[in-house]
Every structure is written in structure tokens, then in C-alpha cells.
Image (cartoon, rainbow, N blue to C red):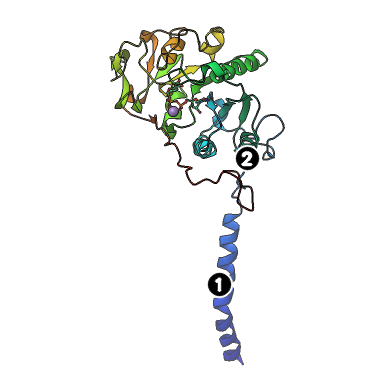
Amino acid sequence: MKSLLFSRFLLLLPWVLIVIIVLDIDSSRAPLPALSPRGGAEGGSGGARPPAPRRRPEAALPTIYAITPTYSRPVQKAELTRLANTFRQVSRLHWILVEDAAARSELVTRFVAGAGLPCTHLHVPTPRRYKRPGLPRATEQRNAGLAWLRQRHQHLPPPQPGVLFFADDDNTYSLELFQEMRTTRKVSVWPVGLVGGRRYERPVVENGKVVGWYTGWRADRPFAIDMAGFAVSLQVILSHPKAVFKRRGSQPGMQESDFLKQITTVEELEPKANNCTKVLVWHTRTEKVNLANEPKYHLDTVNIEV
Ligand code: UGA
Ligand code: MN
């Protein structure tokens, strides 16, 4: 009798052990929080936020405002997707997406609603007379972004630490770049890859100060830097309410200088990216797509957004 009980016990033992192990694994998984996007789009199109967000140390971080001009073309959604995939990984980033259009497009409106990050969607069309090769692009859109930023902060109590950055929709941004620009006190600068007919352009730094520019194109520019090569603190934007991008007399490549000379001097610039010796952003440009075989009239049985 005793030996029968003992053999039953031995038979059951491995099963009991397995059940205990499985229960243990399950309970150690339980505290994982559910994944959810960090923000929603403004204007009612945002998704549900997680309940009762706990205060994290990141609440003290300055907000990075990224102003992105964008216009309708076959690669637009692909570019915006790439950009959102980067921005979604950056804490406290507010995306100001400005469409070059007379109205908000359905494509961008839908995209913003599902982007999963705090986003403001604006639009302003470039006047027809300025839509010509050889003229600067996105002047009106960047100014619309600046106007929104200034207006918003009129109604919010100071101090609101923030940093503004102009993020064109076709460039490539490393995550490290955002860590660097986050500590901008007035205006910060860094190298940009694949621009100016060279592998990179960069501010030349001596003893922690910018003393010149390494560039292969129009070295006479007061600030020989691409739009992707600098950030400005929100305080500087607010204390220079008239600083905007100008159409009059402006040439491509001079917009950056025309804007920066309204708010700072070369001596004042703060070099980032290890004294401007690291490339953390690339002025990539997307190839024009080949649509030679696209039918003249709609042939497919479904309508697909691309
Ligand atoms: C270079 C600079 O990197 C830009 O910052 C500068 O605006 C531009 O020159 C200029 O010529 O003004 P590039 O690659 O030649 O850039 O210009 P794009 O990337 O074609 O355009 C810059 C931004 O403006 C992009 O975000 C693009 O989506 C937007 N854009 C362009 C418009 O909103 N409307 C347009 O008609 C064209
Ligand atoms: Mn570009």
C-alpha cells in the first residue's frame, strides 16, 4: 500500500512541478505595461491616452518642436512614414507639419491621426510665382510654423523650455541628434552630411567657438550651413518676434543665413556633436520615382492610397 502511494506521488511530481513553473513565468510577465502611443494629433483626431500618466523625469526635458514643410508628390507618404518612425522614438517631440497646399489633404490628415506622436497639422500654399526652379522652397510653410509656435506660447505661462528645429521631410536624422539639440541655450550648430557638393559641411570650431565653415559651396555665406544644421531655443524665437524667412531678395542656400543673422551672431553659436566633428543628420534626397507604366485611367479594381 505504501509503495503504491509513493509510486503515484512520483508519477504526479513532474506534472506538479511543470504547473508551478508555468504559473511562475506568467506572473513575472504580468507587470509589463501595455504598449500605447505617447500622444495624439491636436484638434480631436488623437487616439486614447494611457490613463493617469505618472510623472517621469522626462517631464523636465525641453520640448523639441520640429517644423516640417511637406508637399504632395508620389513619395510623400513614404517620406512622412520614415520621419514619423524616427520622431516617435524621441521623447517630448512636437511635430509641426505644414502642408504646401490651399487646404489640408486627406492623405496627410489621415497620416497625422495615426502617427502616434504629438502633432500639429497646418497648411499654407506657396504662391504660384514662387513655385519655380532656382527659388527657395518652403518659405511660407516654415513661417506658418513659426507663427503657430509664437501664438501658442503667448497663451502659455513662462518658462517653457523648448527647442525649434527645421526638419525637411526627405532628410535622415539620427536619434543622437535630438539629444544634442535638446541642450540648446540660444542657437546650436552641427555638421550635415551629403550636402554642398561634399560628403559633409561643418562649422569649424576652435576653443569651443565657431570660427568658420568647412564647405564646398558659396563659402561667402555668413552662415554656411544647411537648414538641417541648426536649432534655436524657444526663448530666442519668442524674443525675436519679427524673425522670419523672407522671399524678397532671397536665393536658395541663403535662407539659413538670412534667418540666422536676424537672431544671432557666428561668435554666439553653440557647437554640438563633439565640437562639430560628428555627422548626425544627412541631407538625403529621394530619387524621383519612375511612373512610366502608370495607366492614364484608373484600371485597378480597388483604390489604394500610396
Ligand atoms: C535644400 C535645403 O536643405 C532646404 O532646407 C531648402 O528649403 C531648399 O534647399 C531650398 O532650395 O529652399 P532640397 O533638398 O533642395 O533642400 O529641398 P527639398 O527637400 O526639395 O525641399 C525642402 C522642404 O520643403 C521639404 O520638406 C519639402 O517637402 C518642402 N517643399 C518643397 C515644399 O513644401 N514645397 C515645395 O514646392 C517643395
Ligand atoms: Mn531635401
Q: Secondary structure at mark 1?
A: helix
Residue type pointed to by label 1: Leu
Q: Position of residue 141 (x, y in %)?
A: 56, 20
The image quadrant of residue 305 is top right
Q: Tell me the residue at 41%/12% (across/down).
A: 257
Residue under circle 2?
Answer: 114
Circle 2 Cα neighbour tier, 10 Å, few/some/many (<14 / 14–19 / ≥20): some
Q: Is residue 193 left or right of residue 51?
A: left
Circle 1 Cα neighbour tier, 10 Å, few/some/many (<14 / 14–19 / ≥20): few
Please tell me which residue lies in front, 173 or 123: 123
Alpha carbons under labels 2 and 1: distance apart? 46 Å
Which residue is outermost to the front? 296
N-terminal label among 2 and 1? 1
As displayed, is residue 68 above or below residue 152? below
Q: Tell me the residue at 61%/52% (across/down).
A: 300
Please tell me which residue lies in front, 217 or 293: 293
Q: Secondary structure at mark 2?
A: loop
Residue type pointed to by label 2: Gly
Q: Position of residue 237 (x, y in %)?
A: 53, 12
Which residue is outermost to the right? 44
Q: Is residue 257 left or right of residue 248?
A: left
Q: Are marks 2 and 1 in contact (CB under 8 Å)?
A: no
